Image (spheres, grey):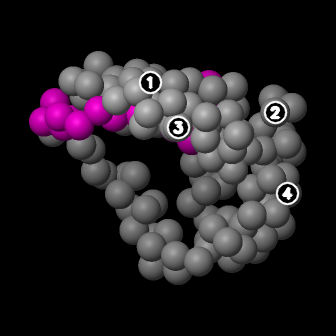
Amino acid sequence: MIPGRLDALARMATPRSYTEPSYLKEADPDLSSEGLQWESEVVSEAAPALRLGGSRGYLYQLLAGMGWTSLPWLWLIRQPTLILAGNEDPILPPINAKIMQRLIPRAKLYIFSGGHMGLLTHTRELAHVVEQFLTNR
């Protein structure tokens, strides 16, 4: 994985991002993109629902991001695969999605204008993309 912006990764690594609903909104006023500032507000509002998986799941997600890679096995995926990536994602830069597209034989990449939480912030656009992908397989 090509890491994201260190400041964004550091903000996500603190337990405050998981335990305090207002933290994400407060932590991101320095984001240069107006779209990402808006995304931060949407994510802050959705934060209680995002925490339903429990703090252990969040910890596992952070640990996996520090040391796991699936790159050696991506070529084995034979199912059609849709990869969604935000062009302004400060956590997972879109270059990672482009690498995955090259390594997964039947992958289709869709890059939208936004950040890391596109399924929350670009729901209609991405729902349409997913629907088209599933219909045209």
The amino acid type found where label 1 is placed reads Leu
Q: Which residues are magenta?
A: 74-93
Find residue 81 and name its label.
Answer: none
In the picture, which quadrant includes the C terminus? top left
Q: Report the side of 52 relative to 133 (left or right).
A: right
Q: Residue 69's spot in the image, x, y percent?
A: 26, 44
The amino acid type found where label 4 is placed reads Glu
* Residue on which disc 1 sits: 109
> Of callouts 3 and 4, which one flags the residue occurring earlier in the amino acid sequence?
4
Query: In what element is the residue under mark 3?
Result: helix
The amino acid type found where label 3 is placed reads Glu
* Residue on which disc 4 sits: 26
> Of callouts 3 and 2, which one flags the residue occurring earlier in the amino acid sequence?
2
Single out the mark in the foreground, 1 or 2. 1
Single out the mark in the foreground, 1 or 4. 1
| 45 relative to 94, above or below | below
Instruction: Count neighbours of disc 1 (C-alpha within 10 A) and say few if under 14, some if 14 to 19, many if 20 or more.
Output: some
The Cα–Cα distance between marks 4 and 2, rounded to whole angstroms, is 16 Å
